[in-house]
Amino acid sequence: MHDFPDYPFQPQRFQPHPGIAMSFLDEGPPSVAGDASEVIVMLHGNPSWSFYWRHLVSGLRDKYRCIVPDHVGMGLSDRPDDAPSAQPRYDYTLQSRIDDLDALLKHLGIDGPVTLAVHDWGGMIGFGWALRDPSRVKRLVITNTASFPLPQAKRFPSRLAMGRDSKFGGWLIRRFNLFARGAAWFGTTRSLPKDVRVAYAGVYDGWDEAISTLRFMQDIPLNDGDRAMPLVKAAEAALPGYADRPAFIGWGLKDFVFDKHFLAGFRTALPNAEVYAFDDANHYVLEDKHEVLVPAIRTFLDRNPL
């Protein structure tokens, strides 16, 4: 049994593929038949896991049902290999993540409306999943993420290019867990306690453990030939269609990837969104500002019942 700070939850397991298990949280009152409206699906990115959402889950679970998966290869989920001969084998692509989320929600019998809460890659996974039926998404909680390609005004950061495009950089990331360790050290403005840093990064210590942190970087779509790009462009086209739904944006402006350019993209597509943008918060905005954001998100959800 793992013991992580501020994570008093009992993870469950589900196999979206034979022999490959996802860990996920299902916290809060069970949905009553016909009233699945209070389901909040929280989707993390790379290199975090459901641990990122722990303060929000604690702040909502008395009233809202919180479904929080660890994507395959992440957090407490299994770490399948993607070599052609691997058994079981997993394809670490955006499409696989979307299919896994769909399978999990079907497994849980969640076939009605949901509120999407997203961070980092969780934005592309959530908005990519929503392309199947955008009407199911009733509210949005958006934190330092994207659902569109790299904005033209934004240069692709060299620290990501190292993992995406360099074999040696990729080796370093898997051998020394550089990406998760770096994010735990530099992804916040406040200094994280050691046990919190260890919770973020320790689950990726080891060559096999870190596979997904690298594969996510290698899947970042920058060019038309990249396999995730059609999904990203479709999500971009669909995004303004959510402007009629309640949306909450919590943003750390010190993020070196999802910076003011990405925030501007969401503000343009969702002009009615309630926005909390912090000059003194970084990529893990729910670490830096959970004392402000958790009650604000709770108030937002309560004020916009479905």
Image (cartoon, rainbow, N blue to C red):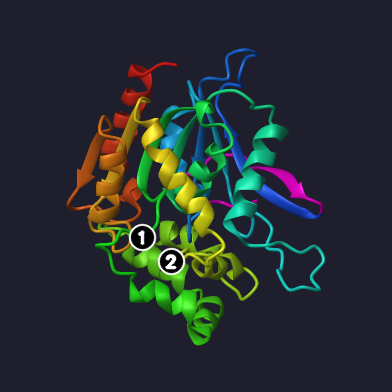
Q: Horizontal and vertical percent for residue 72?
A: 64, 55
Q: In this picture, which residue range is highlighted in magenta?
A: 1-18
Q: Which amino acid does label 2 sit on?
A: Leu
Asked which quadrant contains residue 35, the reply is top right
Q: Name the residue under label 2.
A: 222
- Is 16 magenta? The answer is yes
Mark drawn on residue 150: 1
Magenta span: predominant SS is: loop
Q: What element carries label 1?
A: loop
Rounded to the nearest angstrom, the CA distance separating label 1 from label 2 is 7 Å
- Is 39 magenta? The answer is no
- In the rendered view, tell whether residue 272 sits above or below residue 151: above
Crowd class of label 2 (few under 14; some 14 to 19; many from 20; radius 10 Å): few
Mark drawn on residue 47: none
Q: Which amino acid does label 1 sit on?
A: Leu
Quarter of the image with the C terminus in it = top left
- In the rendered view, tell whether residue 66 sits above or below residue 35: below
